[in-house]
Image: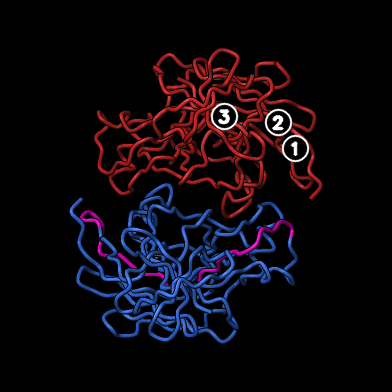
Chain colours: A red, B blue
Amino acid sequence: MKWARIEIGNKSSCGIVEGNQIALVKDGIFDPINLTGQKVKIEDAKFLTPIEPKTFYAAGLNYSEHVIEQALANNQEPNIPKEPHIGYRANNALIAHNQPIIKPSDSSEEFQYEGELVAIIGKKTKNVSEQDALNYVFGYTIGNDVSERKWQRDDRTMWRAKNTDTFKPMGPWIETELDLNRLVTTVRINKVETISFPTNNMIFGVACFISAMSKYLTLVPGDMIWMGTEGHSVNMKPGDICEIEINKIGTLSNPIVLGNN
Amino acid sequence: MKWARIEIGNKSSCGIVEGNQIALVKDGIFDPINLTGQKVKIEDAKFLTPIEPKTFYAAGLNYSEHVIEQALANNQEPNIPKEPHIGYRANNALIAHNQPIIKPSDSSEEFQYEGELVAIIGKKTKNVSEQDALNYVFGYTIGNDVSERKWQRDDRTMWRAKNTDTFKPMGPWIETELDLNRLVTTVRINKVETISFPTNNMIFGVACFISAMSKYLTLVPGDMIWMGTEGHSVNMKPGDICEIEINKIGTLSNPIVLGNN
């Protein structure tokens, strides 16, 4: 089942994707389903981020080639993480499917996408085993962990490199039924494929991260975990459109526009 | 004016501190004030965190002696930050005044407080000047940035060193009228003072951080910024009570208990 959240007359409504339409429900995605009877065509929908997350977790370095790539770019020895140590991103940066990614006027040319699987927590959990961890996932969506690499190298933290307003597109919706091993992530700039990789080819998988995190942290419905990306990214410039597809979920599409700050 | 949030019959209520009582209001701290007429004695109140924050920002290294202290502990050269680069903490870790800080059973002896001023954003802002920045602050409270130093040194991120459940006490309430230059932060363990420092003796002040952050980030009501701490902290152990006082605001008090994870 695919859950979307869209804007109807200045209010947010949740709904279930059925073919080329979204069937609206009365309540939220974690509530019992009561259809309103209203349907909105996908092409007419103004998408919102599928959830307003509680805590925004991010795995960071979680695919081998990406770790090596980032190390080379920074003239460092690759250092494959030995433990699933989670990081954080910020809600201010979130935008939805189709909304513009604004490239700050003072940012460098090294302005890059990162196509990521996003796990949405559906049930409260603490101290869960790796075997049981996926039972606490409500579903999965797609995230674009937009990164300004010069700021990422030079700043003391990743605050503006990764958390500037509009740098975290997510969506278009949440898929609740998935076989993680059958997923492929594909990124396209202006319809030209730039990378494609097996989504679940992670250093530490979703279940491993949830189990490790829950030893110290209580996870609650609405928390989300961005699972990292693979390989090398190419630069994006104003006028481009960045699409991230994960088969069985859908395609997250966002245009790049130049900011005026 | 001092704003508290307390639990009344499983629900949260906001109120204004008047002497030794809290006068409850009908709505939230950002709404017009409508008193309910009900008052609760401070000694009887079950405090909640004064807000449920949107994004939880933290300045990190923001006092000179603390930077030097942390560098020495890590056998590194002190590196005083040259720019106000903000960091992040996680909402799962927040607890209120009087609630226990749970020391994980597998944590080291280096389990330490950090007494911090916390600025609460009251109005939406982007691109604000340093001169105008404090007009967007609703008020100030006290935070204890509890840190497990071994994990802080050894882990790839600060996820469990600083964001384990209960590691972020805040409160007891928000003071809306303050002269930052008249504040002194004092920490006591079991009523014995361990450090006292001028609160506003920061490398980058509240206005500087808000202005710099707002160049890239939209700040919204309910965001909060923890401003860092000064000097050396001593270890806390189960059975201790940690008090952080900032004169003109109040005292945040939390007992330490041993966890069973």
Counting residues from the N terminus, which is met first, the one under dot 3 or under dot 2? 3
Residue B66 is one of the magenta-drawn residues: no
B227 to the left or right of B128: left
**Residue beneath disc 2:** A235
Q: Quadrant of residue A30?
A: top left
Q: Nearer the viewer, mark 3 or mark 1?
A: 3
- Judging from the image, mark 1 belongs to the subunit labelled A
Label 3 and label 1: CA atoms lie apart by 25 Å
Q: Residue A171 shows which numbered tag? A: 3
**Residue bounds of the magenta highlight:** B104-127
Q: In this figure, which residue is indicated by the disc labeled 1?
A: A109
Chain for numbered disc 3? A
Q: Determine the CA span between mark 2 and mark 1.
A: 7 Å
- Marks 3 and 2 sit apart, C-alpha to C-alpha, by 21 Å
Whether residue A41 can be seen here:
yes
Do tag 2 and tag 1 residues touch (Cβ < 8 Å)? yes
Quarter of the view holding residue A192: top right
Q: Is residue A215 above or below residue A114?
A: below
Mark 1 or mark 2, which is nearer the start of the sequence? 1
Q: Amino acid at mark 2?
A: Asn
Mark 2, secondary structure of its residue: loop
The image quadrant of residue B24 is bottom left
Along the line of sight, which residue is nearer the eye, B201 or A216? A216
* Left or right of B164 in this view: A202: right
Q: Please determine if labels 2 and 1 lie on a single subunit.
A: yes
For image coordinates 53% across by 84% down, the residue present is B183
Mark 3 or 2: the one toward you: 3
Residue at 69% across, 52% down: B216
